Image (cartoon, grey):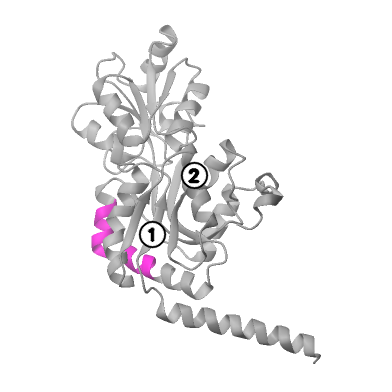
Amino acid sequence: MTMTRKLAVAVVAALAACAQAQAQTYPTKPIRTLIGFAAGGTPDVALRVITPGLSQALGQPVIIENRPGAGASTAMEVAARSPADGYTLAVGTLGSLLLSKALFPKAQFDPINSFDPISFYAKTTFIVATATSLPPRNLKDFIAYAKANPGKVSYGSSTPGSPPHILCEMFKSQAGVDVLGVTFKGSADAGTAFMGGTVQMICDAYPTVGPLIQAGKAVPLVVTGTNRNRDIPDIPTAAEAGMPGYTVESWIGLVAPAGTPMPILQRLNAEVVKVMKSKEANDGILKIGLEPASNSIEQFRAVIKADWPDRKSTRLNSSHTDI
């Protein structure tokens, strides 16, 4: 073996030993989790369900840091540039990882290469609902009403590029209606505007729309999943109601900056999976209308790759290859 090869082997061994030692003592300080959505939105509410158990399992506080903006790409950029030491995580969703990059291609992160997946903690579908002040009480009648009153109905959603925003625009396109879009800082603000009559349509996950429906303050039209929502089983799926192309399901998970030592990723994955098997986390996620979920690092990575097949479109500018 040449001296150069011996040196390379020694360096690799030293790095591996260092990573293993770091993982054995990890964590020794609080862990911050960046989330690109405002407090009160679905990913935020779900994260707050699991953080108590995760903090207890890790022996350190898991601190939530909301950084909404640019379809969640602001938070993802910060996370991608953070040290890969396990002390900065981010909430990765279909919206924050993929849709935000698609809509803001100059965002300085890559859905595939900038992050290491950890695990899901929930899956979700969405609900389209309208104001009780409008006459329609089902999808067919609402579409007819909107077509007869172009530009007179408005929808409210969270930030541009977020799943609720995209879903509302998808609805307009597939239904062929002229509905005015109004975006807000987050889902909670969109819900408040809906309640106040500023907007007459909303499409969001159960934590935002479900309570309005249960209180009789919103008219549910459809759910976007392949199956009906267990909490509102009388509401048809979009396919059942006549919009078969309007089927959307999403996932919510934790990711870390790329290059985080594998032993740390494995520890985080193991703790998330363990927490998601607990009755407290399961009941909490179900209570807010989501589906509890967890998976392996490899399974999560496969989901991201499957949902983002065009890897060439995510290449970063050369001046930012350090992230």
Q: In which quarter of the view is residue 284 placed?
A: bottom left
Image point (60%, 51%), residue name: 110
Dominant secondary structure (helix, strand or loop) of the stretch shown in magenta:
helix
* Image quarter hosting the N terminus: bottom right
- Check residue 290 for magenta coloring: no
Discs 2, 1 touching: Cβ within 8 Å: no
Q: Which residues are magenta?
A: 271-285
Q: Estimate the x, y position of residue 20 in percent, counting from the top left.
A: 50, 81
* Image quarter hosting the C terminus: bottom right
Q: Which mark is residue 32?
A: 1
The answer to whether 312 appears left or right of 148 in the picture is right
- Check residue 274 for magenta coloring: yes
Image point (68%, 47%), residue name: 317
Does residue 42 lie above or below 244 as drawn? below
Which residue does the numbered mark 2 point to in the structure image? 74
Does residue 296 lie above or below 222 as drawn? below
